[in-house]
Image: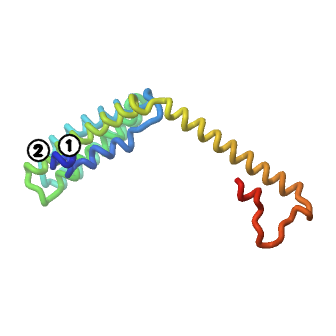
């Protein structure tokens, strides 16, 4: 997509970041966290684009809004039903609005477009990550990973127990000459 669309190539990072942070091992958790992230991203994206449109280059206004948005996000985080949406709301506004609205190298129209691209691509990344983790990588992969980890830990524990037992039962006749390699150790 980035090779075909210059905007995606320039702002594609904002689509990839939510994919990293929204993957969860179960479809239910992915949908709950993903829906909260979508809500926070939409609200913050709209507010950020409005802020950039109303007062571009006004660093003082963005500083005051940063405190207000952070307070509202933290307040939302205190409510258990929307907790993650509050966190996402605060940092999405910072990325979409604060960074674009205070960039003195951009013209006003470019600031608004940058905010829109970041908001839309972040939202696309959230939706993509939620769908992939809910539909493509469901619980089954997580279950296999859990079982493989348990088998690995069991094998490591058995190997350590065997070596401790060998050390305890070793006699002088079992000792190897210095510098030689024990075939039992190499075979593991």
Q: Secondary structure at mark 1?
A: helix
Tell whether 6 sits left or right of 39. Answer: left
State the image coordinates of residue 158 (x, y, percent, origin top left): 74, 45
Closer to the camera in the image, 61 or 160: 160
User: Relative to 121, does residue 181 appear above or below in the rendering?
Assistant: below
What residue lies at 88% left-to-right and 61% top-to-bottom?
174
Residue 137 visible here:
yes
Q: CA distance from mark 2 to mark 1?
A: 10 Å
State the image coordinates of residue 186 (x, y, percent, origin top left): 71, 58
Furthest-bottom residue in this view? 178
> What number of labels is visible?
2
Marks 2 and 1, the one that precedes in the sequence: 1
Q: What residue is disc 2 on?
A: 54
What residue lies at 83% left-to-right and 71% top-to-bottom?
177
Q: Secondary structure at mark 2?
A: helix
Q: What residue is disc 1 on?
A: 48
Closer to the camera in the image, 167 or 78: 167
Tell whether 52 sits left or right of 23. Answer: left
């Amino acid at each position: 997509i980035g090779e075909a669309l210059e905007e995606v190539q320039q702002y594609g990072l904002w689509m990839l970041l939510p994919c990293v942070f929204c993957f969860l091992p179960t479809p239910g958790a992915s949908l709950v966290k993903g829906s909260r992230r979508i809500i926070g991203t939409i609200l913050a994206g709209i507010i950020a684009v409005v802020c950039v449109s109303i007062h571009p280059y006004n660093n003082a206004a963005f500083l005051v809004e940063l405190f207000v948005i952070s307070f509202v996000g933290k307040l939302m985080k205190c409510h258990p039903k929307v907790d993650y949406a509050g966190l996402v709301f605060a940092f999405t506004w910072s990325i979409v609005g604060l960074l674009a609205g205070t960039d003195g190298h951009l013209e006003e129209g470019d600031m608004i477009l940058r905010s829109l691209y970041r908001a839309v691509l972040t939202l696309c990344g959230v939706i993509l990550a939620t769908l992939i983790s809910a539909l493509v990588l469901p619980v089954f992969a997580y279950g296999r990973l859990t079982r493989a980890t348990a088998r690995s830990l069991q094998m490591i524990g058995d190997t350590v127990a065997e070596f401790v037992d060998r050390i305890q039962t070793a006699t002088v006749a079992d000792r190897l000459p210095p510098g030689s390699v024990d075939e039992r150790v190499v075979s593991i």
